[in-house]
Image (tube, helix red, strand yellow):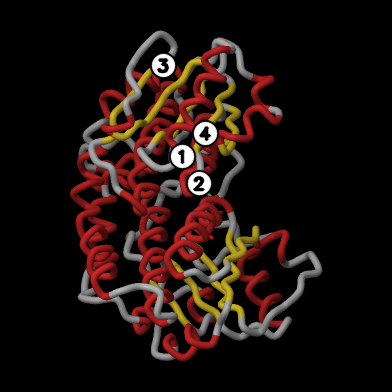
């Protein structure tokens, strides 16, 4: 009811603004990185496995795709990410030394549960879930678990569940790296410090809301949008596009920016807004030339840039500066403005933000 919503217009907006609290709660009680964060048997299992298979749907699968970058770069363990509804119906080559990781807000998604059972039927018994509901089927079915503390999520569009999943997956990365001896104590402590700073960093990004609302007014009249990201920000671009589709009904697609010239550039005209995630990283210079390709075709760029990215407002180039550069955790921070952009675009279009047409909060049927 209205009392619960407080100053917010929708649950989605409330849940976006709850993220500093949700992330803080998810990290609560964690004094140090240890496999036991995932259960009593975690040390033995992490020690045994030599690869990771992530199974999830929708937004949760994008958390999994982000984790692939983290786990391969920090823990040096190969990771496959599979859409649960596809994995369960294809022939794959099982490896008993796999850590099967399901990711689910609800813990009741039929396709993800079925994919988990399929993996088990192939002899993969080492199962772990990152889940927001302690009492769910998913938690019961998996040997190991990490419970995110997002709290109840009511908006159909997942927001705080996603960012807390990312926190859980980063902790998993660190625990795997520790067991495999691929991280020093100093690095571990440094990452833990960065995690603890997240609530403050997220609050600073939430303060960009007025600038994002001004962009949303311009997006409201569009029927198409492109989202670009590279590396570990590509899954964040996918998440940004999904969010816009779900609640504003604007057709949106995400591409790793280097793929533009292999097809989607043909779509770019002055009518195409191109949202670009531009953190200061080793791919920034390449990204800038991808952005020039868009400008040269008259496309309008909407860029979320780190302070030191040296990208300035100009004709057809709209820039919002992110308050902090955040290294490996940057995908978490870059998620927030994309949530706000789709939220305010949907509001401007007058859609039913918390209950978009044709969608259910948790998909418990196939
Ligand atoms: C996200 O905004 C979606 N509504 C949807 O993609 C969701 O993430 C997906 O259905 C998976 O749900 P789960 O995390 O509860 O398993």
The answer to whether the residue labelled 3 contacts the one labelled 2, judged by CB atoms less than 8 Å apart, is no
Which quarter of the picture shows residue 38? bottom left
Callout in the foreground (1, 3):
1
- Return the residue at label 4: 228
Are the two marked residues, 2 and 1, in contact with CB atoms closer than 8 angstroms? yes
> According to the image, label 3 marks what residue?
317
- Of helix, strand and loop, which one carries label 2? helix
Foreground disc of the pair 2, 1: 1
Disc 4 from disc 3: Cα separation: 14 Å
Task: Choose between 13 and 167: the one closer to the eye.
Answer: 167
Q: Earlier in the sequence, mark 2 or mark 1?
A: 2
- Residue that mark 1 sits on: 283
> Between disc 4 and disc 3, whose residue precedes?
4
Asked whether residue 1 is in view, the answer is: no
Where 270 falls versus 176 (above or below)? Answer: above
- Circles 2 and 4, Cβ within 8 Å, touching? The answer is no
Query: Callout 1: 10 Å neighbours few (<14), some, many (20+)?
Result: few
Q: Secondary structure at mark 1?
A: loop
Q: Quadrant of the C terminus?
A: bottom right
Q: Is residue 366 left or right of residue 128?
A: right
| Residues at circles 4 and 3 in contact by the CB criterion of under 8 Å | no
């Amino acid at each position: 009811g209205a009392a619960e919503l407080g100053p917010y217009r929708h649950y989605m907006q409330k849940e976006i603004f709850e993220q500093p609290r949700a992330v803080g709660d998810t990290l609560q009680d964690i004094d140090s990185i240890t496999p036991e964060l995932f259960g009593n048997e975690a040390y033995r299992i992490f020690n045994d496995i030599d690869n990771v298979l992530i199974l999830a749907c929708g937004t949760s699968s994008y958390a999994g795709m982000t984790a692939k970058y983290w786990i391969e770069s920090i823990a040096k363990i190969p990771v496959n990410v599979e859409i649960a509804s596809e994995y369960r119906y294809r022939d794959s080559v099982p490896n008993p030394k796999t850590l099967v990781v399901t990711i689910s807000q609800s813990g009741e998604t039929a396709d993800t549960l079925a994919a988990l059972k399929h993996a088990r039927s192939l002899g993969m018994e080492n199962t772990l879930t990152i889940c927001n509901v302690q009492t769910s089927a998913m938690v019961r079915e998996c040997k190991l678990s990490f419970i995110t503390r997002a709290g109840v999520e009511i908006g159909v569009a997942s927001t705080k569940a996603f960012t807390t999943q990312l926190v859980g997956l980063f902790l998993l990365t660190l625990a795997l790296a520790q067991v495999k001896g691929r991280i020093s104590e100093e690095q571990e402590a440094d990452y833990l410090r960065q995690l603890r700073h997240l609530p403050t960093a997220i609050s600073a990004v939430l303060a960009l809301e007025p600038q994002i609302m001004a962009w949303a007014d311009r997006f409201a009249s569009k029927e198409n949008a492109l989202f670009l990201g590279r590396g570990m920000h590509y899954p964040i671009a996918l998440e940004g596009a999904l969010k816009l589709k779900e609640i504003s009904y604007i057709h949106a697609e995400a591409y790793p920016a280097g793929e533009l010239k292999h097809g989607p550039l043909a779509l770019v005209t002055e009518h195409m807004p191109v949202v670009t995630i531009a953190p200061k990283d080793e791919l920034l210079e390449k990204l800038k030339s991808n952005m020039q390709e868009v400008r040269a075709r008259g496309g309008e760029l909407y860029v979320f840039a780190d302070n030191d990215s040296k990208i300035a407002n100009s004709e057809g180039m709209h820039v919002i500066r992110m308050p902090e550069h955040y290294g490996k955790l940057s995908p978490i921070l870059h998620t927030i403005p994309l949530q706000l952009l789709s939220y305010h675009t949907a509001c401007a279009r007058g859609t039913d933000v918390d209950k978009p047409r044709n969608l259910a909060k948790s998909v418990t049927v196939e």
